Each structure stands twice: as C-alpha cells, then as structure tokens.
Amino acid sequence: MAMVTRYRIEDEVGRVLTVEGFFSYEIDDALQFRCEDEALEEARSFPGTTVERFERYSTFPDFFLSETVSDERNAA
C-alpha cells in the first residue's frame, strides 16, 4: 500500500462530483483525479466549484481513474 495524492471537485455546499456526473454528499463516491490540472479543467464545467486535494491509501499508486472516465465520456 502507498499513500497517493488525489483531487476531487466540490461544490459550494461541500458535495463532491461523482463518476455519474452529479453531486453527492457521499465522499466515497467522488470522482478522483490524479492530476490537478485535469481536475481544474473538469471543474470549469461546473461554475462555483473548487478542486480539493486529499491523500488516501492505494494498492495501485499509479491507477488513473479519471483517465478512464474521460475516455468513456469522450466515447459517448
């Protein structure tokens, strides 16, 4: 296990952006970004949001969840 830095998008009341594209108070459902720039780019689509940095443990420190989601969105 390794400690990894990730980023998530939060709205003005503390809800997080989920993989499904809506906001939820369930932090465990948050869309996680490995790259701050990518999170900032995605946050531009949601006025009034901020990008928050956090750390968590991961068995796959190089796993890039946000890239997978971006690929799925581009395919749609």
Image: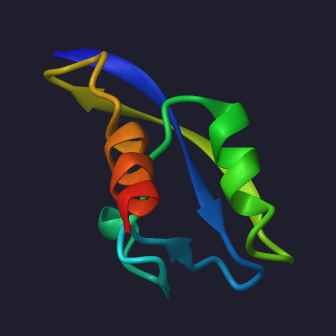
Q: Quadrant of the N terminus?
A: top left
Q: With respect to residue 20, does 74 lie above or below?
A: above
User: What residue is at 36 percent from the left and 58 percent from the top?
Assistant: 75
User: What residue is at 57 percent from the left and 79 percent from the top?
Assistant: 15
Q: Does residue 49 appear to the left or right of 66 in the view shown?
A: right
User: What residue is at 13 percent from the left and 22 percent from the top?
Assistant: 59
Which residue is at the front of the view, 24 or 21? 21
x and y, in percent, of residue 33 in the image:
50, 41
Q: Does residue 56 appear to the left or right of 53 in the view shown?
A: left
Q: In the rendered picture of this protein, how many numbered marks are placed on residues?
A: 0
Q: With respect to residue 2, does 4 lie above or below?
A: below
Which residue is at the front of the view, 49 or 42? 42
Q: Quadrant of residue 73?
A: bottom left
User: What residue is at 65 percent from the left and 68 percent from the top?
Assistant: 10
Q: Does residue 26 appear to the left or right of 63 in the view shown?
A: right
Q: Does residue 20 appear to the left or right of 35 in the view shown?
A: left
Q: Quadrant of residue 67?
A: top left
x and y, in percent, of residue 35 in the image:
58, 29
